[in-house]
Image (cartoon, rainbow, N blue to C red):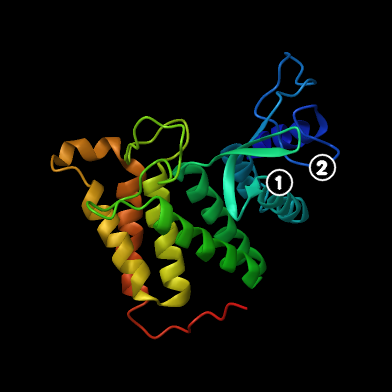
Amino acid sequence: RQMCIRDRYNMCLGGIYEHLSGGFARNSTNEYWLAPHFEKMLYDNAFLIEFNQAEWMDEAETDYTLVKTQMNNAARMHHSWRDGKADHPTTLDNYAQMVRTALILYKTTTQNRYLKDAIEWVVTLKTHYWDTENGGYLVSADDSTDTIVRPKTAQNNPVPAGNGIMVEVLVRILFITSNSDYEDRANQLISALTPEDPCASLHHPMLMCRFELLMLSLIHISEPTRQAEIS
């Protein structure tokens, strides 16, 4: 834990962090991490905001606001930012991670604006990424113009699978709001992407772990819970 905190602190001091407006570049272009790569990525910054929770709450909220503002265009989140411009509609993985980040901030601060952001992004995902015929979320949006195919997967890559994260965030919102629509969507998602061969589940760890989370949450919310107020 101390190693992670130390490395995160040193990252903030180096060139990979933009000291003028905040946020982290994709990577560095020299061995001393003094020269940043030319763009910021949504998924990188979402992960780093989450890591900030325990140690640097103020910075986490600042970075969240920065990412939400800079990488937003026409009410949609975008994949990358460069030279003051957000570009390319973002992918499922990035959106899912931002929803999860918003919910973690809501849990930590109890500020309803974070819950509101999370729910709005889930609506966007339902509108533009949900597979209406077979269930599950597609990687790219229905209005993307630069993709040949729109794959759908629950396998982890260098970042956790977006569909696996979405089961988690749907369960989190279900637990907060007691709105059964989120339970239905989580069940549809799991049914659509759970492999028929049980051995293949080893390749879907995020999805399987979040299925367990859904089962545990349903036990808890079987008792009356308050409906969250979103202002």
User: CB under 8 Å between callouts 1 and 2?
Assistant: yes
Q: Quadrant of the N terminus?
A: top right
Query: Mark 1 or 2, which is nearer the eye?
Result: 1
Given the image, on which type of amino acid does mark 1 rest?
Answer: Gln
Q: In the rendered picture of this protein, how many numbered marks are placed on residues? A: 2
The residue lying at 66 percent from left, 53 percent from top is 53
Most extreme residue toward the top, as rendered? 31
Return the mark for residue 70.
1
Q: Secondary structure at mark 2?
A: loop
Q: In the image, is 19 to the left or to the right of 152?
A: right
Rendered view: 11 above or below 107: above
Q: Quadrant of the C terminus?
A: bottom right
Give 227 or 220, whichever is nearer the viewer: 227
Return the mark for residue 21.
2
Residue 5 seen by the camera: no
Q: Residues within 10 Å of mark 1 (few under 14, many from 20)?
A: many
Most extreme residue toward the right, as rendered? 20
The residue lying at 65 percent from left, 45 percent from top is 71
The residue lying at 28 percent from left, 35 percent from top is 203
Q: In the image, is 41 to the left or to the right of 141?
A: right
The percent coordinates of residue 86 (x first, y second) are 66, 40
The percent coordinates of residue 65 (x first, y second) are 71, 54
Most extreme residue toward the left, as rendered? 197
Given the image, on which type of amino acid does mark 2 rest?
Answer: Ser
The percent coordinates of residue 58 (x first, y second) are 77, 56
Rendered view: 219 above or below 99: below
